[in-house]
Image (spheres, grey):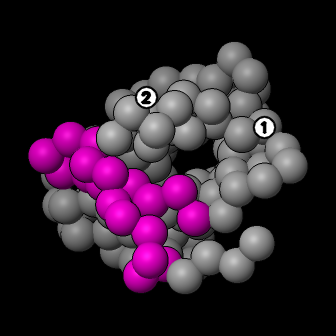
Amino acid sequence: MIVHNNDIPSRKVDEYASRKILGTGGSLMMVEVSFKKGGIGEVHSHEAHEQTSYIVKGRFEVSVDGVKSILVAGDSFYAGLRVPHGVVALEDSIILDVFTPLRQDFLEAEVQR
């Protein structure tokens, strides 16, 4: 599967964030999330999904399992099953999230569009 980012519509998550499902198939899913400054990805955990995230642009305050750090473009983090994690965009920023297995809830939200 080949995906051209410009061909994928953004789905508004809230007033500060939008996401695009980029590559998906098999047991993997890649999602680009764009945040405006002040946007928050609330601390949460996944019962059934592992996640690794890469900062494409900007700066985030990231919390993983209670440890906070400032991450910038080129930095990344991993959150395993049931590991609490969240982000706060310190400026307009983009993060690339990769999940395994697929996030069916994200796919279903696209269908309901």
Residue drawn at (76%, 72%) of the image? 1
Residue drawn at (36%, 64%) of the image? 9
Spot occupied by residue 91 in the image (x, y as percentages of width and height) = 22, 67
Mark 1 burial class by Cα count in 10 Å: few <14, some 14-19, many 20+: some
In the rendered image of this protein, does residue 18 appear above or below residue 56? above
Residue drawn at (23%, 69%) of the image? 92
Proximity of marks 1 and 2: CB atoms separated by less than 8 Å: no
Q: Which residues are magenta?
A: 5-22
Q: Secondary structure at mark 2?
A: strand
Q: Quadrant of the C terminus?
A: top left
In the rendered structure, the answer to whether residue 67 lies left or right of residue 7 reads right
Residue 15 forms part of the magenta stretch: yes
Spot occupied by residue 38 in the image (x, y as percentages of width and height) = 17, 52
Three-letter amino acid code of the residue under disc 2: Val
Which residue bears the numbered disc 2? Answer: 43
Residue 70 forms part of the magenta stretch: no
Which residue bears the numbered disc 1? Answer: 101
Label total for image: 2
In the rendered structure, the answer to whether residue 79 lies left or right of residue 71 reads right
Spot occupied by residue 98 in the image (x, y as percentages of width and height) = 67, 54
